[in-house]
Image: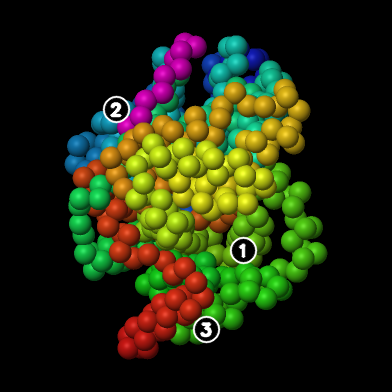
């Protein structure tokens, strides 16, 4: 997966400190390490070699060594950009995608982010002015954390590396606990570590002489008025998979019995596929995945996780998560990536399709809500307040039906409401940020859309980034994990991007076993015809 870490301060022992910090993320890059250290900055990198295996080492420099780059991710259009930059007179030392970012920055300045298609987090440091520029991809697939404490500025792929710096103040952010009990992950702009923040998706960061500046360069929106044919999406996805397979190492694919990964595996033409399941009935998709793998003629690897194995790795899973995370799918993903890493260095995943294609059942409008919407909004909301006073939430379904959307849907993950969490927590852990204050900004952006689109918009900006993608990055150690449904979108620009995002609703994922089987039979017929 690769990873980096760096800091600017006046400490005289930078080399020793950056080595210790870099060693904490060795699991992100076992193939090598690299450093740049001067009197102002220390930069470290751990590499998982995927492209230009012999020469793509980091940190990497431009022609006159005035710029230094730390980069984690993959740029899928780097070959096209490289040709353009060569024609403009730039000289390359490697064939890596990393160097394309550096020369692209020389050519386009901070506008380089508008030219990149891929998943990325990077830092470019100006040696002469001590100015640092950083950016994170549009969805936040790749992690980027930063902190500014007094005169110490630090950045990195994982928070745990910060703990090795002697000047880092280790303090709990008490405001983060109560929202976590509702959302099952860290959802505030500040992490569980006081003063440590994730750079938001689609944002850049500039640090110079103690001043920190954040700027958005990309927003993800849905437009229900646009339209696009499913066949167009299929063509685009075919091209996306080809782009995601660019590597100088072997590429495999995760494979469950779901439509998303099954579709990706069926068009990817890989030799190896991977599945995990559980011993409990109804939680094991290994047989269905093997059936499809046989049709695809792949060498299929599977593992059934026992209860003992599940609980035995919880401490390791939490260590890699950096912050509290209650999405239990992190555990099977941990086993899945561990198994895959013994065979390949790159995997296709199908991640992100549910958020793009409206694949969650919660996006559907319930019969109760359809009935409730016949009443005027003021009356509906009044009825909801009365229902909520019933003991033990006996009429919870009706309360949600009559409530404003902002109160009835806060995303795919919901553990407990603030009333419940307040009873569990001591007063000094009650958060200053309510559930409504967290979701309201995203709902405000989509206020003129229908409810399904508004739910998708919320999930795209909150649940996907702070739960799904964070979990996946932390659990997929020793391999590069790709998101074919996400990283292709940038290629088509913002207006077309909205069309593709929204009208993918026509390709909803199956909601139950029988429908899932119907989709699988459809896929098998296509594969049999192809063979």
- How dense is the environment of label 2, judged by Cα within 10 Å: few (below 14), some, or many (20 and up)? few
First along the sequence among labels 2 and 3: 2
- Compared across the picture, whether 475 is left or right of 293 comes to right
Residue at 67% x, 27% y is 430
Q: Which residue is mark 2?
A: 109
- Magenta part, dominant SS: strand
Which mark is nearer the camera, 1 or 2? 1
Per the model, the C-alpha gap separating discs 1 and 2 is 40 Å
- Compared across the picture, whether 186 is left or right of 498 comes to right
Per the model, the C-alpha gap separating discs 3 and 1 is 18 Å
First along the sequence among labels 1 and 2: 2
Q: Nearer the viewer, residue 199 or 116?
A: 199
Q: Nearer the viewer, residue 531 or 175?
A: 175
Magenta residues, start to end = 208-217
- How dense is the environment of label 3, judged by Cα within 10 Å: few (below 14), some, or many (20 and up)? some
Residue 336 numbered mark, or none: 1
- Compared across the picture, whether 469 is left or right of 61 comes to right
**Where is residue 282 drawn, in percent x and y?**
63, 74
Residue 351 numbered mark, or none: none
Q: Are marks 3 and 1 in contact (CB under 8 Å)?
A: no
**Where is residue 338 drawn, in percent x and y?**
64, 61
Q: Which residue is mark 3?
A: 291
| SS label for mark 2 | helix
**Where is residue 45 drawn, in percent x and y?**
56, 38
| SS label for mark 1 | helix
């Amino acid at each position: 997966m690769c990873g980096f870490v760096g800091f600017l301060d006046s400490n005289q022992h930078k080399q020793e400190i950056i080595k210790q910090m870099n060693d904490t993320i060795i699991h992100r890059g076992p193939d090598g390490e690299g450093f740049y250290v001067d009197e102002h900055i220390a930069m470290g990198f751990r590499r998982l070699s995927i492209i230009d295996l012999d020469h793509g080492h980091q940190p990497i420099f431009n022609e006159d060594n005035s710029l230094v780059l730390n980069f984690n991710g993959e740029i899928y259009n780097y070959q096209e950009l490289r040709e353009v930059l060569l024609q403009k007179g730039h000289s390359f030392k490697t064939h890596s995608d990393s160097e394309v970012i550096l020369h692209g920055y020389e050519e386009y300045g901070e506008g380089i982010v508008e030219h990149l298609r891929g998943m990325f987090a990077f830092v470019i440091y100006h040696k002469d002015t001590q100015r640092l520029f950083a950016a994170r991809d549009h969805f936040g697939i790749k992690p980027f954390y930063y902190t500014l404490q007094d005169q110490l500025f630090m950045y990195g792929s994982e928070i745990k590396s910060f703990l090795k710096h002697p000047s880092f103040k280790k303090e709990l952010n008490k405001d983060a606990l109560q929202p976590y009990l509702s959302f099952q992950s860290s959802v505030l702009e500040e992490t569980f570590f006081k003063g440590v923040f994730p750079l938001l998706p689609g944002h850049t960061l500039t640090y110079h002489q103690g001043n920190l500046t954040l700027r958005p360069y990309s927003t993800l929106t849905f437009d229900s008025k646009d339209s696009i044919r499913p066949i167009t999406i299929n063509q685009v996805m075919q091209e996306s998979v080809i782009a995601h397979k660019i590597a100088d190492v072997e590429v495999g694919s995760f494979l469950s019995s779901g439509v998303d990964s099954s579709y990706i595996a069926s068009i990817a033409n890989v030799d190896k596929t991977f599945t995990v399941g559980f011993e409990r009935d109804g939680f094991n998709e290994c047989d269905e995945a093997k059936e499809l793998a046989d049709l695809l003629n792949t060498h299929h690897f599977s593992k059934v996780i026992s209860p003992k194995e599940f609980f035995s790795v919880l401490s390791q899973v939490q260590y890699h998560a950096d912050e509290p995370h209650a999405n239990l799918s992190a555990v099977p993903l941990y086993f899945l990536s561990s198994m895959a890493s013994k065979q390949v260095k790159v995997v296709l995943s199908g991640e992100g399709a549910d958020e793009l294609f409206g694949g969650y059942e919660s996006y559907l409008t319930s019969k109760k809500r359809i009935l409730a919407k016949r009443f005027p909004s003021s009356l509906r909301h009044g009825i909801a307040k009365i229902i909520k006073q019933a003991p033990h939430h006996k009429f919870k379904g009706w309360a949600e039906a009559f409530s404003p959307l902002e109160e009835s849907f806060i995303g795919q993950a919901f553990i407990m409401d603030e009333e419940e969490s307040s009873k569990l927590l001591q007063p000094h852990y009650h958060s200053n940020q309510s559930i409504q204050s967290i979701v309201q900004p995203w709902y405000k952006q989509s206020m003129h859309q229908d409810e399904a689109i508004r739910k998708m918009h919320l999930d795209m900006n909150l649940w996907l980034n702070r739960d799904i993608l964070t979990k996946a990055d932390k659990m997929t150690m020793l391999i590069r994990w790709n998101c074919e449904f996400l990283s292709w979108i940038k290629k088509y620009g913002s207006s077309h991007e909205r069309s593709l995002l929204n009208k993918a609703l026509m390709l909803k994922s199956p909601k139950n076993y029988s429908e899932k089987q119907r989709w699988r039979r459809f896929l098998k017929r296509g594969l049999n015809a192809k063979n």
